[in-house]
Amino acid sequence: MTLNRYRLRHQAESGHTGARRAHALLQKPDRLIGLILLGNNFVNILASALVTLIAMRLGGEGAIPVAAGLLTLVILIFAEVAPKTLAALHPERLAYPAAWIYTPLLRLLGPVVWLVNLIANGVLSLLYLNPGHQAGDSLSREELRTVVNEADVLIPQQHRNMLLSILDLEQLQVEDIMVPRQELEGIDITLPMAQILQRLQTLPYTRILVYRSSIEQVIGILHVRQLLSASLQNPQLNHTQLQALLREPCYIPKGTSLHQQLHHFQRQRRRSGLIVDEYGDILGLLTMADLLEQIVGEFTTAPADDIPDIQPQGDGSFLVQGHTSLRELSSLLDWDVPRNGPRTLNGLIVEHLQNLPESGTSVKIAGFPIEVLQTQDNCVKTAHIRQPAASSDNLPP
């Protein structure tokens, strides 16, 4: 009964004969328990009767209590505690050989076991219990997370992190990892072709948003490889030919889980999508690379001038970009912030202050002192976060 059912199933499918027999026996645990207890009680009662007869012949009726005490001690140590402790510590070592004995015994004593189980199940039915119902071996998400965390010897840390990240895909939404609208870059189709081509040379992306006058009016996605191929065939590329190269953008409703969106990308054979709210306004951009990085970790190479979102300082504090996700900060700083509110540091500060902060504004949120260092376009661009131990009491709550 203490066998690891998943290891047992794996070994049975791998051809281990003992595991196959043990797995077959555990498919009907009531019959197995009935067989074991039938033999167990038969041996105990038989031993008690024999010890009583021996005690009567050797010492009369006065020796029966002594014999009963000795028999109880012997059975308790050698037939109960010691073997069952050994079986609990090393179940496979005993269960697989025992399965070779239980299988023929179950066939031999099948009618007796069936009768015992029939009566026992009848008693359970009177208590409104269903003996045929078995609890499934399936694990919940949190139980599976515990199994992965405890498999530190069997699974490398990097692989454990990937497995845990996969489990988190159902809980995370596309807004958690999207590139916000304020940071989206693209080209305006209304500009002259010379400016468009010059702009394309400065963008470090292979797939580029193309919009008309405003980022709110995206008309398609341009693949740079197709543009190069078309420009080689026709050096005098015009706006009409450029628009013919565009692919219709994919729109993702706000609130879509990452797990669901991963399947959408696979089914639609898309690599990116624009996230929109219930009014159709663009909130941000999600790419397949961003989604995969949630599983395997960061693997893309950032531009040389790209500033890290979180920069550790020598005194234990951090310089943090305003668009940094609170989920990433919470994981790094063990910061207990609400999960159903703002998703970025900028949103958290603005919601806490109920207005747009100026440079130099200090605030304490969930015990962490935060100083706004730089603002841009009505947003917090950079903030300085100190550890709670280094906080100052004169900061506003």
Image (spheres, grey):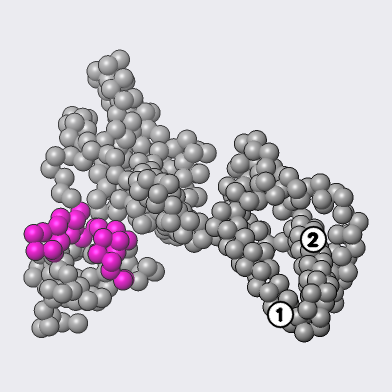
Q: Position of residue 52 (x, y in %)?
A: 81, 74
Q: Are marks 1 and 2 in contact (CB under 8 Å)?
A: no
Residue 159 falls left or right of residue 69:
left
- Give the residue number, with chain letter if any, for mark 1: 66
Q: CA distance from mark 1 to mark 2?
A: 25 Å
Q: Position of residue 18 (x, y in %)?
A: 67, 42
Q: Residue placed farthest to the top in the image?
A: 233
What residue is shown with label 2? 39
In the image shown, does 17 or 181 lie closer to the viewer? 17
**Kind of element beneath mark 2:** helix
Q: Quadrant of the N terminus?
A: bottom right
Stretch of the chain drawn in magenta: 309-337
Is residue 290 among what the camera can see?
A: no
**In the figure, is residue 286 to the left or right of 1?**
left
Pick the quarter of the image with the C terminus: bottom left
Which corner quadrant of the image does residue 223 belong to? top left
Amino acid on which the number 2 mark rests in the picture: Gly
Q: Is residue 313 something one can see in this rendering?
A: yes
Residue furthest front as drawn: 58
Q: Secondary structure at mark 1?
A: helix
